[in-house]
Image: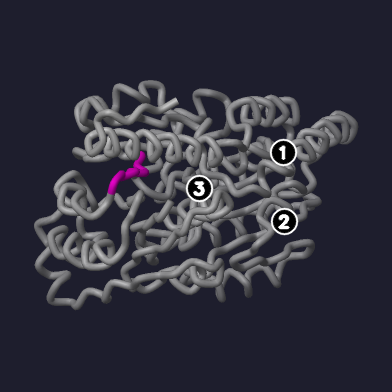
Amino acid sequence: MNICIRADASVEIGSGHVMRCLTLAAALRERGAVVQFVCREFPGNLCATIEQQGFAVHTLPRPSEQEGGKLTAASLYERWLGVSWERDAQETAAVCQRFALDWLVVDHYGIDARWHKCLRPFVRNILCIDDLANRPLECDLMLDQNLYDNAKERYTPYLAPHTITLLEPKYALLREEFRQKRDIAQQKNHQKARQHQQDRKIHQIFVFFGGSDPSNVTAHAVRALQSLVYEGVALQADIVVGIANPHKDQIAALCKTMPQTQFHCHVPNMADLMLRADLALGAGGSTTWERCCLGVPTLAVIIAENQREMTETAARHGIQHNMGWHEDLTVEQIADTVREYLSKPDTLRQMSANAQKLVDGYGTQRVVEAMIHQSITTHILTDTRKYPNKHYG
């Protein structure tokens, strides 16, 4: 298959869209597909990261201030495109029409059915990755890997009857390392449970609030842990930030003032860091499913509106604790919540078990199989129109 992926990363957008698309791209490449990306050159883009992983990137020019000013009447997510949807569609089509594309994968909140229809002449199939369920989408497959109580009903007004939906965390786009280390994580979680029953202590904390974290929730979390250490609580911590984090130097300096604390930037071994954690502090984004796969109990913070519903639902299902909206949290409140859960090893153990039941690590493979099946179906339908007397076994 020949595949193009349209996704952006920036300080405002974050890195999650591109990172989960990279996971899908790697799995597709394993099955023999040729995958390339189309990304706009925003500040904080991940074009270099994509190229480092061996994928070609076709860059769209960074918007000018004048172009951005024309979008003042647009919604927040439409402004994330940086230009009008018409221009973005034209620029993307200029790339796509150069290739015989089997698939166009679109992971962008600023793109809707109008854009998809403009690209239809240049691609055989379209896969939309979404979790907002707030606008019409014109696609053959629609993937929403998040957990909602009414997952299918959310999209009913926005999809055509022919669209196949891939819903809930069984389709979570996780890198192969998480699936491979899931069994190790289960064994370690049993060992941790026995240790917690003996000493009733949490030893290792993992902190990650997304690739960009523009609100700098990471610094609040580090200061909260710092206050607990000053109280005499014996804690070790791994503090992780993305390469697009504008506060990474400040956080690195802050970590140096804390004993038993390691600072990590844009790490390739996220699964290893999660494996050694007894508790995580993190955002309610796509990293949720990585933590679930490895059974890491989590205190989750909502750092963007698109995370709110999913974070609340996950808390109701007992796979994490919802600390609420980041703007309402103080350092003291974060410290109090961590302190509370330090004395609840049984609750954390149950949270871990609930999380691993929900995510088995095979989501990416399921999505790839769905794409392959749809490609075969499309090929047969096209072929039978050309050769109506041809028979297939």
Magenta-colored stretch includes residue 128: yes
User: Is residue 298 toward the left or the right of residue 392 in the image?
Assistant: right
Q: Position of residue 34 (x, y in %)?
A: 46, 59
Q: Residue at x 29, y 27 (%)?
A: 154
Q: Quadrant of residue 189?
A: top right
Query: Could you tell me the amino acid type at mark 3?
Result: Ala
Q: Nearer the viewer, mark 2 or mark 3?
A: 3
The relative height of residue 314 versus residue 278 in the rendered view (above or below) is: above
Q: Quadrant of residue 391?
A: top left
Q: Residue at x 72, y 56 (%)?
A: 237
Q: Main secondary structure of the magenta part?
A: strand
Q: Tell me the tag on residue 283.
A: 3
Q: Residue at x 72, y 43 (%)?
A: 180
Q: Tell me the tag on residue 182.
A: 1
Q: Residue at x 63, y 25 (%)?
A: 357
Query: Could you tell me the amino acid type at mark 2?
Result: Ala
Give the residues drawn in magenta, as a range. Answer: 124-131
Q: Tell me the tag on residue 93.
A: none
Quarter containing the C terminus: top left
Cα distance between the residues tagged 3 and 1: 21 Å
Crowdedness of circle 3 by 10 Å Cα count: few (<14), some, many (20+)?
many
Cα distance between the residues tagged 2 and 3: 16 Å
The relative height of residue 2 versus residue 351 in the rendered view (above or below) is: below
Q: Nearer the viewer, mark 2 or mark 1?
A: 1
Secondary structure beneath disc 3? Answer: strand
User: Is residue 171 toward the left or the right of residue 5 in the image?
Assistant: right
The relative height of residue 13 versus residue 145 in the rendered view (above or below) is: below
Q: Position of residue 54 (x, y in %)?
A: 54, 68
Which residue is identified by label 2? 237
Query: Could you tell me the amino acid type at mark 1?
Result: Arg
Residue contact at pointers 2 and 3, CB within 8 angstroms: no
Crowdedness of circle 2 by 10 Å Cα count: few (<14), some, many (20+)?
many
